[in-house]
Image (cartoon, rainbow, N blue to C red):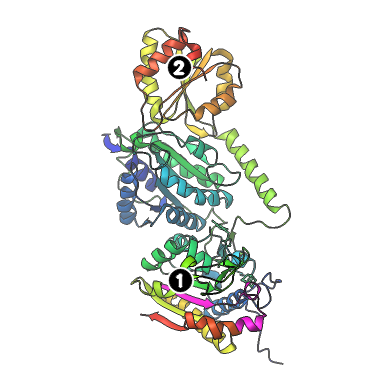
Amino acid sequence: MKKIFERPKSLRDVPTHYCAGCGHSLAHRLICEVIDELGIREDVIAVCPVGCAVIAYEYWDFDCSEAAHGRTPCVATGIKRIHPDKIVFSYQGDGDLAAIGTAEIIHTANRGENITVIFINNGVYGMTNGQMAPTTMIGQRTSTTPLGRDITRDGYPLKITELLAQLPGSRYVERVSVDTPANVIKAKAAIKKAFKNQIDKKGFSLVEVLSPCPTYWGLSPKDACMRISGEMTKEYPLGVIKDT
Amino acid sequence: MAKIMMCGNEVIGEAAVHAGCTFYAGYPITPQNELTQYMASRMTESGGTFIQAESELAAINSVFGAAAAGARAMTSSSSPGISLKQEGISYLAACQLPAVIVNMMRGGPGLGNIAPSQADYFQATRGGGHGDYRTIVLAPSAVEEAWHLTHLAFDLADEYRNPVLILGDGILGQMMEPIEVVRKHLHGKIANHDMRHKPWALTGCKGRKPNVIRSLYLGEGELEELNRLLQMKYDRVKSKEVRFESLYTEDSDLVVVAYGTTSRIVRSAISKARQERLHVGMLRPVTLWPFPEAELQKLAKRAKAFLVVEMSAGQMVDDVKLSVLGKKPIHFYGRAGGGIPTEEAILDIIRDILRAKSRNKVRV
Ligand SMILES: Cc1ncc(C[n+]2csc(CCOP(=O)(O)OP(=O)(O)O)c2C)c(N)n1
Ligand code: SF4
């Protein structure tokens, strides 16, 4: 019988610590599929974030570094400058990239650093118990917005990807989602393009992935996916934001 | 061989290049700007990487990346900037990554001023960031010594896979002194530092199992084990890497303990005191951590008293006390907030102590 689906080689065969229906596991898998397809596993160096994906290196079967919370792009920069021919990517949540590490991601993008960034936007701080993130939706209840995010107190959802797209140093910026099979396929294509850009030395590429956090959205995995298509994509529309 | 005039900041930069440093990231702050600027031109002309980072956090964390990738990497700053770098230094220590961090101390706390100071001694020698860790701390007192200690810093960092601090101050950074060693190397290529002896480095996993650089240990007892290994390493450093200079200590009744710039002022005070036949000498720690405890213990057997002189409110006094263990009186004279101890003031205190006029007044 022909095998039509299998675990990517770059993804270790270990039990997952992610909650059921979490977008991180899907995103990990897509990255590994792309790395396998591009045949670059032995050239990849990943920078893992602080957040639910802090132990991404337990799943990824290639060289990985930890980074302090939000400093992920700086660590990636240091690695890339020493090994310009290796494929360096950072993987960051919205707390990591859009809050504590805002300065770092802006300046890394603005330098046009030839790296790939996978940005997981689940609108909350998963790891620390579901507090508000800069990307939390208006009215969304979190453990630090018990009555819902209130713009007069908490400000607006931060469209960091659109912001990054403004910078001349950023080359390719796309927002995707992993809520439906069709969107998963598009997400993979975007991730692949972001890696190819780096191989072709085109410069800074970032893929924002709208990603369910059923646990801290208080929804079933299925309803969490439906929330992305129903609610979240209104604030964060899918598609290519910049491709030059 | 002709001598060249260079300031301490530039000499550290040139020595770093000569030692094989291929990565420098920094953020401007007085009084260490000459070093950042020097690295900008030297890294560019020699094919290394120079990054003017958006902050000290970015600088130290990209040094983390470069060190993880196997390079010899350096950053520099001055006191307020070093406070920000503490996050990265703790991570470097935890991940056992080699890096060199230069602190040209200025007056604090807070924004303070840009005058020389030695008030970051606690921060440098106690770890500074969070967690149980140590950094090796080298304290040059002259421009030429800065050249040698910069080489040593990179070697020790690699040998022990640990961050090494070069602790100077605004005077050392800005002061120009003739230096002989540099000329033949000046504007030379970056030394070809071999990365192959760093099997742990991130280079892509071709032909080997993937490498992971991390400091997160969640398993039962795992982090305790890491801490145990780190402490064993620090013990090794303590037993092998203590460095100091002694001056007239064989016959001194009073031993002055001073490091860096302050030790130079102390040195001239001592030579005047010697002309007055006062039996005074100096112990100058070159490594502030590990501290020359054993040497002080030895000196405590014959010296009658110790005097610590610092540009701080008395931070190194703690280490001297811990070494002397109450066996002999310890006096202190210091200027904090950018003040510089004068030769006359030090000489007065030396006279007072040795002539036992005001022992209680200056005793700490
Ligand atoms: C300097 C620092 N501050 C705070 C934390 C605590 N912390 C850990 S993860 C996290 C938020 C992570 O959120 P996000 O990046 O959105 O990732 P997620 O867990 O949602 O995947 C925080 C605040 C930390 N580890 N370090
Ligand atoms: S808390 Fe949310 S982001 Fe974290 S693993 Fe669970 S579902 Fe995923």
> Where is residue A157 shown, x and y percent of the image?
47, 72
Residue at (55, 28) in percent of width and height? B319
Report the Cα–Cα distance between label 1 and label 2.
63 Å
Whether tag 1 and tag 2 are in contact, CB under 8 A, the answer is no
Q: As rendered, which of A74 and B108 lies closer to the eye?
A: B108
> Where is residue A109 shown, x and y percent of the image?
40, 68
Give, as a three-letter code, the residue at label 2: Gly
Q: Is residue B287 visible?
A: yes
Label 1 crowding class (10 Å Cα cut-off): few <14, some 14-19, many 20+? Answer: some
Badges 1 and 2, same chain:
no
Give, as a three-letter code, the residue at label 1: Leu
Q: Which mark is residue B281?
A: 2
Question: Which element type, helix, strand or loop, lies under badge 2?
Answer: strand
Residue A218 colored magenta? yes
Q: Chain of mark 1?
A: A
> Where is residue A174 shown, x and y percent of the image?
45, 80
Q: Is residue B24 above or below residue B5?
A: below
State the image quarter where residue B216 is shown. bottom right
Magenta region, residue range? A203-225
Whether ligand 1 has any atom under 8 Å from the Cβ at mark 1 is answered as no
Q: Chain of mark 2?
A: B
Q: As rendered, which of B36 and B57 lies closer to the eye?
A: B57
Residue that mark 1 sits on: A158
Q: Is residue B297 above or below residue B225?
A: above
Residue at (37, 15) in percent of width and height? B271
Q: Is residue B298 above or below residue B105?
A: above
